[in-house]
Amino acid sequence: MSISEEQVRHVALLARLGLSDEQIASVGVELNDILVQIDRIQSLDLAGVEPTTHAAEVVNVTRPDVVRPCLLREEALRNAPEQQDGAFLIPKFGG
Amino acid sequence: MTADLSLLTAREIRDGIEARDFTATEMVEASLSRVSTVEGDVHAFNQITPGLAFAAAARIDAMADAGEPLPPLAGVPTAFKDNMNLRGTNTTCSSRILQDYESVYDCTAVRRMLAAGVLPVGKCNMDEFAFGSSTENSAFGPTHNPWDLDRVPGGSSGGSAAAVSAGMAVLSLGSDTGGSIRQPGALTGTVAMKPTYGRVSRFGIVAFASSLDQIGPFSKTVDECGLALNAICGKDMLDATSVDLPDEDFTSGMREGVQGLRIGVVRDLLELEGCDPRVRDAVRATVEGLEHMGALVGEVDLPSCQYGMPAYYIIGPAEASSNLARFDGIRYGHRVPDAEDVMDLYLRSRAEGFGPESIRRIMLGTYALSAGYYDAYYGQAQKVRTLIIRDFERAFADYDVLVTPTTPTTAFKLGEKAADPVSMYLSDVFTIPVNLAGIPAVSVPCASIDGLPVGIQLMGAHFNESTLLRVGYAIESMSDFDPVPPLVKTGV
């Protein structure tokens, strides 16, 4: 499979990356180089093979439902690019 | 005279402080002294933390003064990869997007090392977000290999490897998603372990691929690798995938020898095209040495592992594209100052903040997970993962330890592979299957070629780290490899 420039633009939008036309072109070439390698697994007949999501066999890990200390608000806001009244400040939605 | 950290082991440091031969404070001074002579050339660190190190040293020295028993890694100068949170430091992942990010909590593995008495000397350079095999993808400039400053130290934990190799730290922690501990370990002549998935809590490390990431140590000797594992392993309520097993002293069985151990050379991987024949010969010679010591040596094939690289370059980027969605310029990290709206803020903050390899991986992962391609790429890669696990299960029915080179070549030159992502990816061909299967593996230096270290990779069944250290110790005892690079010797 190879990826077209239009697809690269679509994927960049999905990934929320505002790439320049130049970047779109170069990333497209690089992705196609990588996809050539990846295509080696496309031709394998894997019908009936179960997928593995995780190499560790742990299920439904729970902890006692008790109140514990957690990150303080001021700590959570320490790295905020902009903040106001104890909250993260963002520009308007939509537009 | 300042002590030479490249000649002291973690045990000698702890015992020396307890015996009052020297102080923990002097260990920080020794580290800083080495930093002042070699760090300008090596660039292993993003941040040096003398304040934290001296404060930790003062606590250890007070304990020694009071005659209290010292913890197992007391006074050992230790460096941490810059994707591990530690309060009082920035955690940058060598990325512009996190350049000014201040840690607001501690990574569990780092906290456990500190509880074992180590002195935190700094945060280490890395490939941005651990994407790479040379540390050239750092936004803050590459790390140089202490064995040859024109060559890469490997990556992505190249700074952690170089810090130990150059004697600026005695121990360090790195993280390994597809080889990012073992590959730089091999290229810098250090002992470098990726523990079993679940052995070490991942809490507080900036996630790359959550089903593959694991934290592990770098050291000069196998014994110190075991000591570091003793400190960092164990169940953590803050990481649901961490495994609850009884405490184990990983160094206790280390000297038992290899008599009767079944060691399988992975024939089809060893014969892979692109592996330097001299590396292959060094690994074969090491295995012969183990056979002379009583190991039962045979050969085994892992036929599905040839598909490890393509599967990894789906699964790794897919998980990374999801994990890195959090860097959106809202709660932390780089934000463009003049965004028109939220979408504009996302698009430009992320495009400005991420470097080229991060953009490549996010794009690849987003594509692989996108509608219409998910089954063909991600689904198929997850099935290949199952085949690789089965390969290992079959092999471990017959063998206790499997062997390959850690890397196909010795350290390559800076810039040599930087322009060709696919050739860079191939330097992890031997290490990737281990992460996909979740098993433990360690790289141990076994030889040198033209003055550059060669690592042998020892792989074991889940939670069988102690057997790997037993074999590693045997290799170390018979090898004449000197882990101190000439740069450091002439620098003293």
Image: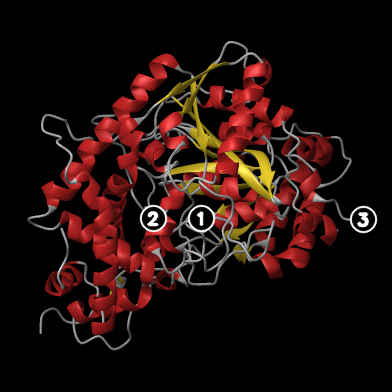
Q: Identify the image quadrant of residue A17.
A: bottom left
Task: Residue at 58%, 45% (x, y): give it.
Answer: B186
Answer yes or no: do the residues labelled 1 and 2 have beta carbons within 8 Å?
no
Answer with left or right where residue B425 lies relative to residue B455.
Answer: left
Q: Amino acid at mark 3?
A: Met
In the drawing, what numbered circle is on residue B422?
Answer: none
Mark 1, residue position? B155
Q: Amino acid at mark 2?
A: Leu
Query: From mark 1 to mark 2, how far is it between C-alphas?
Result: 32 Å
Task: Please give the chain letter of the residue carrying mark 3.
Answer: B
Residue B248's place in the image compared with B160, above or below, is above
| Same subunit: marks 3 and 2 | no
Mark 3, residue position? B1
Q: Nearer the viewer, mark 1 or mark 2?
A: 1
Q: Nearer the viewer, mark 3 or mark 2?
A: 3
Q: Nearer the viewer, mark 1 or mark 3?
A: 1
Residue B261 locus on image (x, y percent): 56, 15
Query: From mark 1 to mark 3, how far is it between C-alphas?
Result: 34 Å
Mark 2, residue position? A71
Please report whichever mark, 1 or 3, sits nearer to the chain's N-terminal start: 3
> Badge 2: few (under 14), some or many (20 or more) residues near its Cα, within 10 Å?
few
Answer with left or right where residue B460 lies relative to residue A29.
Answer: right
